Amino acid sequence: MNRRTLIKSTVTFAAGALTAKRSNFQSSPILDRVNPERSDRLRIWERGLEWRPDISHLKARLLANENPYGPSPKARLAMMEYTRMGNRYGHTQAEELIAKLAKLEGVSENCILLGPGSSDLLEKTATVMFHKGGNVVMADPSYMSLVKTAQYFGAEMKGIPLTEDYAHDLVKMKSAIDDKTRLVYICNPNNPTGSVTSSEKLYQFCETTAEQVPVFVDEAYLEFIENGRKDSMVNLVAKGKNVIVSRTFSKIHGMAGLRVGYIVALPAVIEEIAALSRSNMGMNIASLQAAMASLDDEDFLKMSRHKNAECRQFVAESLTGMGIDYIPSHTNFLMFPLSTDGKLYLQNMFTRGVGVRVFEIDDMPWSRVSIGTMEEMELFVQTLKVVLA
Ligand SMILES: Cc1ncc(COP(=O)(O)O)c(C=O)c1O
C-alpha cells in the first residue's frame, strides 16, 4: 500500500478529525516551538488530551519503541559486576567502548563521540549547527528531536513530504537546500512511519550532498533489518565525507533506560560537538560496561531481531485480517491510519491496559504501535478488535 491509497482510505474521516483536533489541541506558542513530536504536518495527541495517560499500570507498553527482551544477559551481568565501581568516573570504560566501536564501524577512534543516549547527541549537534539559526532540511513526518533543538535557536524546519512509498524524497530534499541550510537530517528507517529509503539512493545522495552541507543520518532502527549494518552510511565517514551517523543502544540492544548512544563523524566535526561539554562526563560505568558486553552478545541481538520480526508479522497479518491497511515496517513499530476518533481510540486502548501512540498527520489520526512480546501483541490485537468494533 502506498501513501495515496492510505490517505484515500482515511480521507472520509478527515473532516471529522480536523474538527476534533482543533478543539482538543491546546495551543501554546512556546510549547509548540519546543515540542519534540510536532512539525508542520505531524502532531502527537497525548499533549492535547484532557486526561493524562497513565503508563504505570499498562499491561502492554507499546508506545516508546522499547525492546521488551533487553538488556541482554551479558549486559545484565556486566552491570551487576560494575555497580560496585559506581564511585569512579567512567573515563577508561568510555575509551574502551570507543575503541570497540571504532573497530566495529571501520573508522578511527577520533571519529566517535559517546552520549547518554543518541538524543543527547542529536541535541548537541543541533546546538552546534543551529545556534546562529539557519534551516534544516528533513522529511516530514520524521523524528523531531534534533529539529526541536534547532527550532529553539530560531532555525527553520524545511520539511519535505515522504514519497508515495513513504521513503525520503531525496530529489526534493536536495533542491530544498539553500544558502541558509546548515544540515540535512535523514532518519532511516524513519520514525514514526517505520519505512525505509533505498540505501543505494541514500548513499549517492549523502556522498554528493555532503560536499555542500553536512548530512546527519539517524540509524536508530537500522539493526532491526537483517544485515542492516550493510545499509549504514558510516562508510562515507571512513571515506572522508561530511556525514554524521547516529546509533543507539536503546533499540536492538534493549538498553533504553541505560542511556548509551554514539555518533560517527569526521574528527573535526566530532571535536566541534565534543567542545560543548566535557567528553564522557554524562556516561556511567555500569552502562558503558553493559554496552560493551551487549556488543559481544550476538545471540541476544539475533534473538531480538527475529522475535521482533515474528511479532511484527503477527500484527501485520492481524491488521490485514481486520481490513486495516498499514505502512510496511522495517523497525520495532508499525503505523496504521485510524478510521475513528484518535482521542477516543487512545483513551479506550489505555483504559484497557494497552499503551500506544496516536499521531496526526495532515489532520488525520494514525496509530503507532511498538512491537512488544507475542503476549503483548496478542493483547493489542484483542483490544484493538474491541475498541474498533
Ligand atoms: C529515530 C530516533 N532517533 C533517536 C532516538 C533517541 O533514542 P535514545 O536517546 O534513547 O538513543 C529515538 C528514540 O525513540 C528515535 O526514534
Image (cartoon, rainbow, N blue to C red):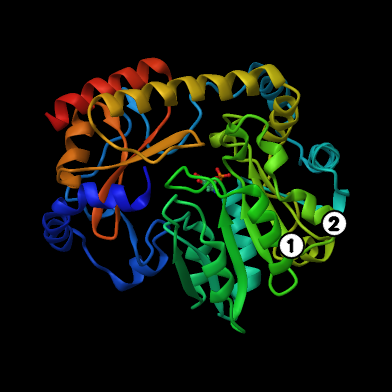
Q: Is residue 318 left or right of residue 121?
A: left
**Does residue 57 appear anywhere in the picture?**
no
Q: Nearer the viewer, residue 26 or 173?
A: 173
Mark 1 surroundings: few (<14), some (14-19) or many (≥20) residues within 10 A? many
Which residue is identified by label 1? 207
Residue 359, above or below 313 = below
| Residue 231: x %, y % from top left | 68, 43
Discs 1, 2 touching: Cβ within 8 Å: yes
- Residue named by callout 2: 239
Q: Is mark 1 within 8 Å of ligand 1?
A: no
The percent coordinates of residue 283 (x first, y second) are 69, 44
Which quadrant holds residue 267? bottom right
Image quarter where the N terminus lies is top left
Q: Say what secondary structure mark 1 lies in.
A: helix
Would residue 236 appear left or right of 57 to someone viewing this image? right
Q: Amino acid at mark 2?
A: Lys
**Picture residue at 15% right of the left edge, 43% below the top:** 340
Mark 1 or mark 2, earlier in chain: 1
Q: In which quadrant is the C terminus drawn?
A: top left
**Rendered position, 55 above or below 381:** below
Q: Position of residue 202 (x, y in %)?
A: 64, 55
**Foreground residue among 69 and 10:** 10
Q: Nearer the viewer, mark 1 or mark 2?
A: 1
Marks 1 and 2, how far apart in space? 9 Å
**Does the beta carbon at disc 2 come under 8 Å from ligand 1?**
no
Please give the label number shown on residue 115.
none
Q: Please, what secondary structure does the residue beneath circle 2 have?
A: loop
Q: Is 352 rendered above or below residue 237?
A: above
Residue at (59, 35) in percent of width and height: 258
**54 or 327, which lies in front?**
327
